[in-house]
C-alpha cells in the first residue's frame, strides 16, 4: 500500500487544527452571548433624582421640651382700712363707735370731705369691689366715691348712702370697682345735695 505523502499529513493536521480553533471560537462566542444576555436581563438600579431625595423620610425630629409656664400671680389679701387711721382726714373727726369690734369711726361728714390712704398695694390681681361700713340718721342721701392718686380724679367706684336708722346703726354697702391693680393713693370722697352732715364711716375693705 502506498503511504500518504507528508504533505497530505500536514494538510489534514492543519484542517483538524482549524476545525478545533473554529469550534473553540464558536463556544467562546456562545458563552459571551450568554453573558451579554444575562447582563441585559438584570434590572439596573435606578438612581433617585435629587428632587425626590428630599422626600425620603428621615428620622423623626426630637420634640422640644415645653417652655416653662409663668405661675399665676397670687391675689393680695387686703387689710381692713379703719377710717380713723387714714393718712389724712379732711373735714372729718374721729369718735368712739358702737359698731361691732369697737374702736372708732369718723363722723360729721358732709360734701367736700375726704379720707386719704397712702401707698395702698392692690397687687397684680385686680380689686373689683369695696365694702364700706356706713351709718346715717340724716334726712338727705349722699354718695361715697373711691378715687385714685388725686382727690379730684375720676371715680373708680361709688355708692349711694341713705338713712340707716341711726348714727350708730351700721350697715355694710358694696361698691363695684373698675378693676384696680398696682399701688395707689386711695381717696374716699363724699358728696351730697347740700352742706348738711349725712353719714359716718367705720371702715373700708377692698376685695377681688
Image (tube, helix red, strand yellow):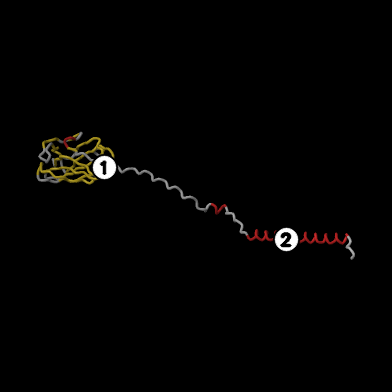
Picture layout, residue 150 above or below residue 28: above
Mark sitting on residue 147:
none
- Give the number of callouts: 2
Q: x, y percentage for residue 201?
A: 15, 40
Q: Secondary structure at mark 1?
A: loop
Q: Which is more toward the observer, 155 or 22?
A: 22
Q: CA distance from mark 2 to mark 1?
A: 101 Å
Q: Quadrant of the C terminus?
A: top left
Q: Cβ–Cβ below 8 Å for labels 2 and 1?
A: no
For the point 55% across and 52% down, which residue is it? Answer: 53
Residue name at image x 46 percent, y 50 percent: 60
Q: Is residue 73 left or right of residue 112?
A: right
Name the residue at 52% across, 53% down: 56
**Rendering coords of residue 4 (x, y %):** 88, 63
Task: Name the one closer to the observer, 134 or 155.
Answer: 134
The quadrant of the image that shows the N terminus is: bottom right
Find residue 152 and report its horizontal and vertical position in percent. 24, 39
Look at the numbered disc 2 and give the secondary structure of its residue: helix
User: Which numbered disc flags the more N-terminal residue, 2 or 1?
Assistant: 2
**Picture residue at 23% right of the left edge, 35% below the top:** 118
Q: Quadrant of residue 104?
A: top left
Quadrant hosting residue 109:
top left
Spot occupied by residue 173 in the image (x, y as percentages of width and height):
17, 45
Other residues around mark 1 within 10 Å, as few (<14) / some (14–19) / many (≥20)? some
Q: Which residue is mark 1?
A: 75
Q: Which mark is residue 27?
A: 2
Name above or below for residue 32 compared with residue 184: below
Labels 2, 1: front one: 2
Amino acid at each position: 500500500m502506498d503511504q500518504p505523502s507528508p504533505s497530505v499529513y500536514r494538510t489534514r493536521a492543519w484542517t483538524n487544527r482549524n476545525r478545533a480553533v473554529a469550534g473553540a471560537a464558536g463556544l467562546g462566542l456562545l458563552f459571551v452571548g450568554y453573558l451579554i444576555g444575562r447582563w441585559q436581563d438584570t434590572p439596573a438600579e435606578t438612581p433617585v433624582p435629587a428632587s425626590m431625595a428630599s422626600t425620603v423620610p428621615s428620622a423623626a425630629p426630637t420634640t422640644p421640651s415645653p417652655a416653662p409656664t409663668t405661675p399665676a400671680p397670687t391675689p393680695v389679701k387686703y387689710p381692713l382700712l379703719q377710717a380713723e387711721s387714714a393718712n389724712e382726714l379732711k373735714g372729718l373727726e374721729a369718735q368712739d363707735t358702737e359698731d361691732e369690734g369697737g374702736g372708732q369711726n369718723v363722723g360729721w361728714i358732709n360734701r367736700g370731705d375726704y379720707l386719704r390712704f397712702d401707698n395702698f398695694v392692690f397687687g397684680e390681681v385686680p380689686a373689683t369691689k369695696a365694702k364700706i361700713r356706713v351709718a346715717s340718721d340724716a334726712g338727705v342721701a349722699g354718695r361715697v366715691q373711691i378715687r385714685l392718686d388725686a382727690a379730684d380724679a375720676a371715680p373708680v367706684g361709688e355708692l349711694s348712702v341713705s338713712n340707716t336708722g341711726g348714727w350708730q346703726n351700721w350697715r355694710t354697702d358694696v361698691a363695684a370697682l373698675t378693676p384696680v391693680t398696682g399701688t395707689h393713693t386711695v381717696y374716699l370722697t363724699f358728696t351730697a345735695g347740700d352742706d348738711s352732715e349725712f353719714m359716718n364711716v367705720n371702715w373700708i375693705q377692698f376685695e377681688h
